[in-house]
Amino acid sequence: MPAILAITVPFFALVLCGYLAAQFRVLPESAIPGLNAFVLYFALPCMLFRFGAATPIAQLLDPALVVVYGICALAMVGFTIAMTLQRGTGGGVDLTNAAFGALVAAFPNTGFMGVPLLVALFGERAIGPMVVTLLVDLILTSTLCIALAQMHGHLGGAAGAGDTPLRVALGRSVRGALGNPLPWAIVLGAVFSIGGLALPGALGEIVKMLADAATPVALFTIGTVLWRAGRHAHSRTPAAQFVPVALFKLFIHPLLVLAVGLLANAAGLPISDLNLTVLVLAAALPSASNVSLLAERFGADNGRVARIIMTSTTIAFISFSALAWLLGAGVHA
């Protein structure tokens, strides 16, 4: 356990540093969007490009891992919506908020936290399965949940003026997913991997410098985004509407991935113990912090979403560290 904590404590401490910096106005609120943009459009794409270029394509796009993680993502979305819609957990919410609750229950903080954390624990062996989880969540999970959030009255009731048919909502969500730079960075890295290509000296050094900045700045940014989301929350959400969803994320999601992975292995899908362990730990990560910004954009209760993310991030320090220890996570020397 001390070796695990030596990795996890600095990661969560940087998140806390970002939160406190925003709370005490060391970092002005106006700087948070720029900080987030730097991570999303510069630092993280460079880090993912480097990982993709250094990883064999068979590891980046392992179909067995895609199947297992994709099934679990869909199951988590369906389960969370069923538990929170209308008369579900905590009295229930409408479809828009149920869909965003499902998104934070199924979408771990893979890019900003998970990739560097799992690589720190397992070394470069974790890159392949972590890239799989990121691609599934960016392309499948987020697209489906955002599309459902826009439908509202089209499922089980009369559609309102702002509601969107499924076909239109899916089209918008797919276009949004295609505008995210992270999948394209992975694809470009995969192209370099297949072709055995390398960036020329100066350009390669620039990409390396940006990639090296990704982990600390991303973790710091998580804290600032959480603070901002809490500050701009326009409602007081009952604990019964956000605590269960945070627990779904931290406990049901990894247990589901473990169960489906073991069943897939028994059915003949080739999934190594290491890859399954990485998938399970990815599912045990706290909810993706940037979902609060999406919730605000699409008119959902961003206060509820922010509280789910905050709760899952706080509890994950203990739950993730304990699970990593139980699963025998090794530390990369």
Image (cartoon, grey):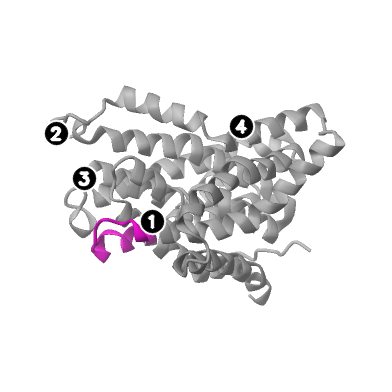
Q: Residue 310 or 33: which is nearer the viewer?
A: 33
Left or right of 82: which side holds 260? Answer: right
Mark 2, other Cα within 10 Å: few <14 / some 14–19 / many ≥20 = few
Corner quadrant of residue 298 = top left
- Front in this rendered view, residue 4 or 164: 164
Distance in Å between CA atoms under marks 1 and 2: 31 Å
Q: Which mark is nearer the camera, 1 or 4?
A: 1
Q: Nearer the viewer, mark 2 or mark 4?
A: 4
**Stretch of the chain drawn in magenta:** 230-246
Q: Nearer the viewer, mark 1 or mark 2?
A: 1
The disc, 4 or 3, on the residue closer to the chain's N-terminal end is 3
Which residue is labeled 4 in the image? 184
- Residue 190 locus on image (x, y percent): 70, 32
The residue beneath circle 1 is 229
Q: Earlier in the sequence, mark 2 or mark 4?
A: 2
Mark found first going from the N terminus, 3 or 1? 3
The tag earlier along the polypeptide, 1 or 2, is 2
Report if residue 65 lies within the magenta region: no
Label 1 vs 4, first from the N-terminus: 4
Residue flagged by tag 4: what amino acid is it? Answer: Trp
Identity of the residue drawn at 50% across and 38% down = 138
Residue 286 visible in the snapshot:
no
Residue contact between numbered discs 2 and 4, judged by CB atoms under 8 Å:
no
Amino acid at pointer 2: Gly
231 falls in the magenta region: yes
SS for callout 2: loop
Q: Amino acid at mark 1?
A: Ala
Q: Is 320 rendered above or below residue 183? A: below
